[in-house]
Amino acid sequence: MTRPRQPKPAWPIAPMIWLATFSCGGESESDSAESTTSASDATSSANPSATSAGSGGSDGKTTGPGTTSSGASTTASSLSNSSGGASNSSGDASNSTGGANASGSASNSSASDTSSGGAAGGSGGSPVESLCPESPPQNGGACDEAWIDPAGFVGAHCAWGTDPRPECRVSGLCFNGEWMITEPDVARCDEPPLPSSCPETPAPIGSTCEMANLECWYDDGTRCVCSPCMGGSEWPLCGMIDPPEWACTTPDRACPNPLPNAGDTCEGDLQCGLDCELPIICQDGVWQWGQNGCPICAAPNTPIATPSGDRPIASLAVGDVVYSVEDQAIVAVPIVRVGSTRVVRHQVVRVSLGDGSVLEISPGHPTADGRTFAELVPGSALDGSHTIVSAELVPYRYARTYDILPGTASGTYFAAGALIGSTLANTAQP
């Protein structure tokens, strides 16, 4: 029986300048978990079977290994999952640690303006106004602000509050004509920005610390994290270190301090985010909180093709055998790496395919031919055998995202029967 054709997306996906090629979205906490093993050791346990196939790109003819699952279809019922954005974006990061994927310039200078909520400073000296409602609207209320581009690839159109931590402010996204309001995490934000356990002044970068994931915000805008990850970044994989070390980042001194609210007016083309989790960009005269581009990817129930049938991606482990593509042939190989990351605010691209399958994948996740899911449009091909019926940005309702890396040079795998890439493919083994 032929499945009904899916409607065209209510929100077209339009990649913006801050979207990195091999990254996936979501505002995350430092709770990334991953397993690694040697590709050569894992491959020896597999019994690869080769079938002639194309490369899986837009001009190839690779077909999936007989999967019939309808894919990972989830609803957009969550009203608190909105984020996304920028990984490895342009801008100097002279005071951020290696691999921190800072979004925007970071220097070792301090901002002199300390007005609340980014109301002044970093905008050419002009008074800053907000284009947003004076107070947060009701969740689900109508939004018809003329300045909002409904096709824009943003994490929040408006924000309210003066806490130096953006995640501790109320944020709002105008989605399908309704406000999606996200309240701060009370348990997290009840703590002061500079807890008593923090040093009085920023610690030297790379010096050891005791309380892993302790976050300290200082008056000059500097944020320091006691990071258990090598280089201060968990993206795309956290190289665990013990003891943890201080990783500190200070925004460019031209940026407002505290960081500006989404919807505030601005001048120039400043980029003031501190990392890949929340790019903050002055675009078209308005501060925008962008989609998060940290490498975190697929919904837990995404069906992955294996010799024993489709399995949810969340159930897979290192050594499990999945189908991939090697030298233009479909082969069964073991997984050599898995990744899972907790997300707090996140949106994914829901892609409906011509065979009725549905995928929900983070915007920056790579396709098999090197595009990102944010670039997919109706009528185009996901791989050589699957045409895209619709692609829309939707809230993500799960607590974690998942990715795997098969033991092939391509690093590709079949999700809901379609060949896609892996964010872990270009990651060196720790």
Image (cartoon, grey):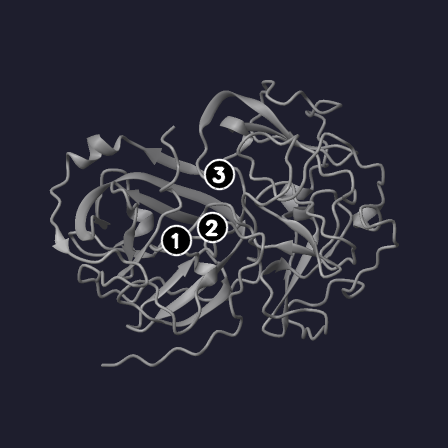
Mark 1 and mark 2 in contact? Answer it, CB < 8 Å. Answer: yes
Name the spot of residue 397 as percent of width and height, x first: 48, 58
Please tell me whether mark 2 sits on a helix, a strand or a loop: loop
Q: Residues within 10 Å of mark 1 (few under 14, many from 20)?
A: some
Amino acid type, mark 3 = Trp
The residue under label 2 is: 21
* Residue name at image x 87 percent, y 49 percent: 125
Mark 3 and mark 1 in contact? Answer it, CB < 8 Å. Answer: no
Q: Is residue 104 left or right of residue 335?
A: right
Amino acid type, mark 1 = Gly
Please tell me whether mark 1 sits on a helix, a strand or a loop: loop
Distance from Cα at disc 2 to Cα at disc 3 = 14 Å
Quarter holding residue 33: top left
The residue under label 1 is: 370
The residue under label 3 is: 235
Q: Earlier in the sequence, mark 3 or mark 1?
A: 3
